[in-house]
Image: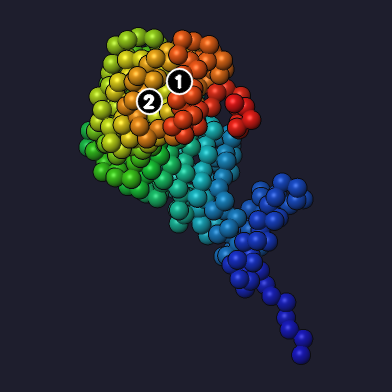
Amino acid sequence: MEREPATIHSLPDELLHAILSFLALDHSELGLDTLKAASLVHSSWRESAQRFIWQAGAELLTPAEVDAFIRTRDRRRCGPSELAVHAHTSTEQLVRLFDACRDGQLQMLMIAAPTRDLDPAVLQHPNLEHLRQLILQGWFVATPASTVQFPFKRLESLVAHDLTPRGRSSLHHFLSALSTSNLDALSSISLPSIAGPLAAETIAQALVPLAPKLKHLGLSLNDRVASTEAHFIPVLEAASTSLYSFECTTLPHTLLPHLPTSLRVLATMEEAADIHPTHLIDVVFARCTHLERLYFACERREIMYKPRGTEAILLARERGIDWRFAGEHGDDDE
């Protein structure tokens, strides 16, 4: 007796996932967008297939693409696990977009609005409760209410790229609201840009309550103002036993004596060559005894040819510290 061919929704999940993953590869004639479109109209694709296709994520480059995604709401059985929004017209459009993520498990959200205000109030949407990673880029001008509570209690990582004109940033209010939202899982914060010395003080103050649970901290300190650097000393001291990695655009020598003793990874970008080897030997290596990796965005010779430079490099090697410089990728570079 001849058996009927299996329909796609009756296939084992593992096999279905393998088939769809293969079809979505770049070299395939069927791209992920094609599979998504097919899943909305093909009745046999509306259950298992949609879980794999739509949960793969969505990247929306224009406001028109945001609207197009919103229109798929009633034909989808689930929302994306990752969502990247590169442009939007208004806060209201973002709310409608988050409405369209219902029945999903949205875990990563990126909103990029280089010339637009990001109102933190929009992040109170209940469909964001499963967020683990949040990436924001834009103007932080709107001030959230003091009683705001964000739903993403399992948030692990925050990147906030503040492009606000100097003197107008309210990023510190957003960070303060996070600290009162009981985000016990938040262990990584990166601030790739800070809107000037005036904002630095309030941002540092807002970071202090969050610091004891941080495993990673990234800061942009490139205005060469000594008072700006000093504001972040309490942040490092509050993270003295928890911080695993610290990345700073510049690493002022005034911060070195306050680096957390728990530190294992240290990276610095601009003006890395200005860090004197003596400070590394007598302060960093002496204080951070668990250090495993260093990255300096300068050439190795710029450190080696300084007084005590070779000593610092040899001491790092002796302690098993993997010290990489710009352009280096492996042991052959040493």
- Seen from the viewer's position, the closer of residues 12 and 113 is 12
Residue 234: image quadrant is top left
Residue at left offset 75%, top offset 51%: 28
Q: Are marks 1 and 2 in contact (CB under 8 Å)?
A: yes
Q: Secondary structure at mark 2?
A: helix
- Percent coordinates x, y for residue 129 in the rendering: 37, 49
Circle 2 Cα neighbour tier, 10 Å, few/some/many (<14 / 14–19 / ≥20): some
Question: How would you rate the neighbour count of disc 1 (Cα within 10 Å): few for under 14, some for 14-19, many for 20 or more?
Answer: many
Residue 199 figure quarter = top left
Judge whether 34 appears above or below 202 on screen. below
Residue drawn at x 46%, y 10% as measured from the top left: 307
- Numbered circle sitting on residue 258: none
Q: Would residue 328 be found to the left or right of residue 218 on screen?
A: right
| Viewer-nearest residue: 234 or 5 | 234
The residue sitting at 40% across, 32% down in the picture is: 291
Quarter holding the C terminus? Answer: top right
Q: Position of residue 81 (x, y in %)?
A: 50, 50
Nearer to me, 24 or 73: 24
Q: Position of residue 213 (x, y in %)?
A: 29, 39
Query: Of the numbered discs in the image, which one, if any, rests on residue 285?
Result: 2
Three-letter code, disc 1: Ala
Residue 224 located left or right of residue 234: right
Q: Is residue 2 left or right of residue 150?
A: right
Where does the N terminus fall, quadrant-wise?
Answer: bottom right
**Residue type indicated by callout 2:** Phe
Q: CA distance from mark 1 to mark 2?
A: 9 Å
Counting residues from the N terminus, which is met first, the one under dot 1 or under dot 2?
Answer: 2
Image location of residue 54, percent across then percent down = 57, 53
Residue 37 in sight: no
Residue tagged 1: 312
